[in-house]
Image (spheres, rainbow, N blue to C red):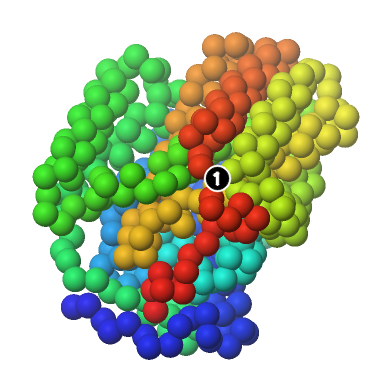
Amino acid sequence: MPSTPSSASPSAAPGSRRWLALGLIAAAQFMVIMDTSIIGVALPEIQRDLGFTAQGLSWVFNAYVVAFGGLLLLGGRLSDLLGARRVFTTGWIVLAVGSLVAGAAGSPAVELVGRAVQGAGSALIAPAALTLLFTIFGATPKELTKALAVYGAAAPAGGTAGVFLGGVLTQFASWPWVFFINLPLAAAVVALAPSVMPAGAAHRGSVDVAGATTVTLGLGSVVFAVVRAPQVGWTAPSTVVAGLVGLVLVAGFVVRQAKARQPLVRLGIFKAPNLAAANAAQFLLGAAWIPMFFFVNLYLQKVLGLGAFASGAALLPLTVTIMVGMVAVAPRLIARFGPKALTVAGLVTLAAGLAWLSFIPADGSFWSDVLPASLVTAAGMAMAFIPSLGLALSSAAPQEAGLAAGLVNTNYQIGSALGLAAMTAVAAAFGADGSAADLAGLTDGYSAALIGAAAIAAVGAVVAAAWLRTPATPTSAPDVSKEQVVA
């Protein structure tokens, strides 16, 4: 049943409480991303203890991604109907349950169930977190930009922390602790959220169960196909069938949404200025950025011979550059030049950095061949992410804030999966699937993938330049009036 909106505006809440709420929202982004990276170092131990096959082991990662990507739109819709805080806290409970199951698993099947439940919890958390961020800070454009910057910076922090924590916990404790570490943070968030976050206005309506099932299965099938294709082949029957089934289900979902009285996704939302364009920019940004992070890490370990910890340390300058850029630099540039110009400039810079990285040699050095170019890519990511995210979220009506958050998260995640799968295929075609001792072949493959990622970022810049509209007040962050804030 719909809850009664709070009479007090979140913006009027004490400053310390509002910024603590932002800390919880950033923790959500941190945890969602960390859960995709923390298991990497632990995979060999998980395989040995649970008896995974070499091919099945990849699904410890993929089960999370498929559930997360497939359920994001449903999470956004539930956030609008039930209230963002309720869905946010429920998501943390679901994530904690999945973490407990994954950590206590005694077989591959139970492990994969736990990882899928973790993904489902993250799919509830992510759109609700962005809705809460806009609820609390949307009335003040300057503060909104700062809040988005902190939220955005939590992603690279979570990715890097996952690499380090996974190694530390696996080496000094045991692999189940890469999952159990989620439990105390989940408990703290669930305990604090009611006192620091607005309840959010619930709205009358129903969940389109058939539509939710269709789009979840459709997106899940597409993600299943693209993440599995590099292992079994793009023309393998399982890849083709899963991809076609997914596309048919997604098409059926679109048809249903056009006819439904209370659709899961109101198709008219895409008529909002900048919503579709900003989502396209986020899609292409994810498709370019995630392959860069993936292949640079492989180059550091397989070609330059760095260990997992040394490789994680080598990525710290990139992470710090992104965090500083998002928190301290991007808000000022948005205020000076506007979100459209900064999105385009960021994607161009990212493309240039990726092109520079593609010149990595087989006998290269981190200091001369990786570090300078990686810092350029980090600067591009820092410039493009915040303004495109802000434009996507501020374009929707307040009662559809959760849906807008679900859409932008879905586009970024699906773009990441598609980009990584496609560039993995490119790397394999140019030599990366050969012997581990063939450093020249590995380097050629990684270089080709980085060139492909640069091309994706360049296309993103063209799309943003041609399609994004300059807001009415270009010198400020995307604005949300006080009347639009959900109490």
Check the image and report above or below for 192 versus 446. Answer: below
- Quadrant containing the C terminus is bottom left
161, 461: nearer the viewer: 461
Q: Residue at x 52, y 31 (%)?
A: 466
Q: Position of residue 175 (x, y in %)?
A: 55, 55
Q: Is 139 positioned to the left or the right of 477 in the image?
A: left
| Label 1 residue SS | loop
Q: Is residue 351 visible?
A: yes
Is residue 320 left or right of 105 when viewed as pictured?
right
- Please state which amino acid type lies under the numbered disc 1: Thr
Residue sitting at x 24%, y 50%: 266
Q: Quadrant of the N terminus?
A: bottom left
Residue 92 place in picture, x, y as percent: 42, 68
Mark 1, residue position: 470
Please state if 11 lies on the left or on the right of 216 as rendered: right
Residue 202's image quarter?
A: bottom left
